[in-house]
Amino acid sequence: MTTHIQHAEQLSTTTLLRFATAGSVDDGKSTLVGRLLHDSKSVLTDQLEAVEHASRSRGQEAPDLALLTDGLRAEREQGITIDVAYRYFATPRRRFILADTPGHVQYTRNMVTGASTAELAVVLVDARNGVVEQTRRHAAVAALLRVPHVVLAVNKMDLVDYAEPVFAAIAEEFTAYAASLGVPEITAIPISALAGDNVVEPSAHMDWYGGPTVLEHLETVPVSHDLTACHARFPVQYVIRPQTAEHPDYRGYAGQIAAGAFRVGEAVTVLPSGRTSTIAGIDALGESVDIAWAPQSVTVRLADDIDISRGDLIAPADDAPAVTKDVEATVCHVADQPLSVGQRVLLKHTTRTVKAIVKDIPSRLTLDDLSQHPAPGQLVANDIGRVVVRTAEPLALDAYADSRRTGSFLLIDPADGTTLSAGMAGASFAAAAGAEPGAAASDDAEWDF
């Protein structure tokens, strides 16, 4: 019993790393994840037995560790990864949330989903094939989503006789490409996921490599998702007015702090109204506190009686974001139905949802070579492109480069609530010279803002 308590206390003091895996079809992503879970002893006995049974039924002598993550029946039958598979595991040094994303081109939107909250991306490359089109596509998505750490895992080194020149050439090509996209940190590791080389344990076949194993790097990479260091932002989710005899004048604004920290006595601005006040009190878990920080859920009380409702944003008076009705952003289109110029949508940003019109789609990004296809008119599933959206009400958006939490938004179909696109305010690669603007949206009495 004492051991379990000590283990829980130890885990509570370790840091959390969210990371995603990506790579081309048959590069071995699922095998790498399975090997990582198996060799770090994060697989339950019944799970391993199920994998061994499934492997034998398919005529395989050794357990196919890829089956630990390819959980969907279609994935098992086809031998591919279709959906994002999330896995939670821990070592004595760190806790992990892993998103195993698909490798197919038609599932680019799934990689965007998995990598959107990741601090690190593991991009796999088959040592026999080197850097291919899908490798460049995944590096570009990681750069666009501002993933701060990228690991190049050169897999299947056993099939190229563990040759150092093969690894060096692939690492040099990928590093140069990723660096040109603005990826701040790139670490290349030669591995064999099938044999277990350099995944959890160092390889006995590559004495020329002196760097960390995959797990060692995951355990030691600096975690940079400290939300308390970001611009302080508090989206209001609910207004609390109990109006009881005990609290006749209580008015509090409840929600989760998206970033930064707030203190009692601090001057704040309420957006989009622009009204200012001072924090009179902060309630957390039923008690009054002097300071609260992200991602705590709290109730904030202000000194002045201001008209505030769900969707308003509270920010420091000297560090408030700009308010605008014209949103320029990069979006990844995730719906099967296209997004077109002139289309009516809903835009959801933090706790605020407003009507909007797609005014322009200036360009679509070709991830193969990062060229811009001007004025495509619409975006289809898995497309990434620039959009200009006009909203009915002003929004307080940060740039995605400054805050992934308050710089992102969703475009939603107002008819059925389907998510159409995931947007990143201001995020883009260098625009192609000479890109022509798209056609203007048609006028509409209700939606033309």
Image: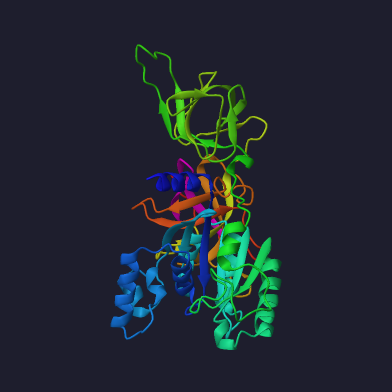
Image position of 245 (left or right of 112)? left
Relative to 116, does residue 160 appear above or below in the rendering? below
Could you tell me how many numbered marks the image carries? 0
Relative to 20, does residue 251 appear above or below in the rendering? above
Residue 434 visible to the viewer:
no
Q: Nearer the viewer, residue 138 or 449?
A: 138
Residue 445 lies, in percent from the top left, at 45, 45
Q: Nearer the viewer, residue 179 or 325?
A: 179
Image position of 361 (left or right of 38)? right
The rendered magenta stretch, by its main secondary structure, is classed as strand
Image position of 173 (left or right of 302)? right
Point out the image quarter for the N terminus: top left
Residue 5 lies, in percent from the top left, at 42, 44
Residue 359 lies, in percent from the top left, at 53, 54
Relative to 7, does residue 282 appear above or below in the rendering? above
Picture quadrant where residue 336 is located: bottom left
Q: Please say whether residue 358 is one of the residues in the magenta stretch.
A: yes
Q: What residue appears at the point 55 percent right and 54 percent down from the top-left corner? A: 93
Q: What residue appears at the point 44 percent right and 51 percent down from the top-left corner? A: 345
Q: Nearer the viewer, residue 423 or 432?
A: 423
- Residue extending farthest to the front is 2
Q: What residue appears at the point 36 percent right and 20 percent down from the top-left corner? A: 242
Q: Please say whether residue 124 is one of the residues in the magenta stretch.
A: no
Q: What residue appears at the point 57 percent right and 76 percent down from the top-left corner? A: 191
Residue 401 lies, in percent from the top left, at 63, 52
Relative to 219, does residue 259 appear above or below in the rendering? above
Residue 283 visible to the viewer:
yes
> How is this picture coloured?
rainbow
Q: Which residues are magenta?
A: 343-361
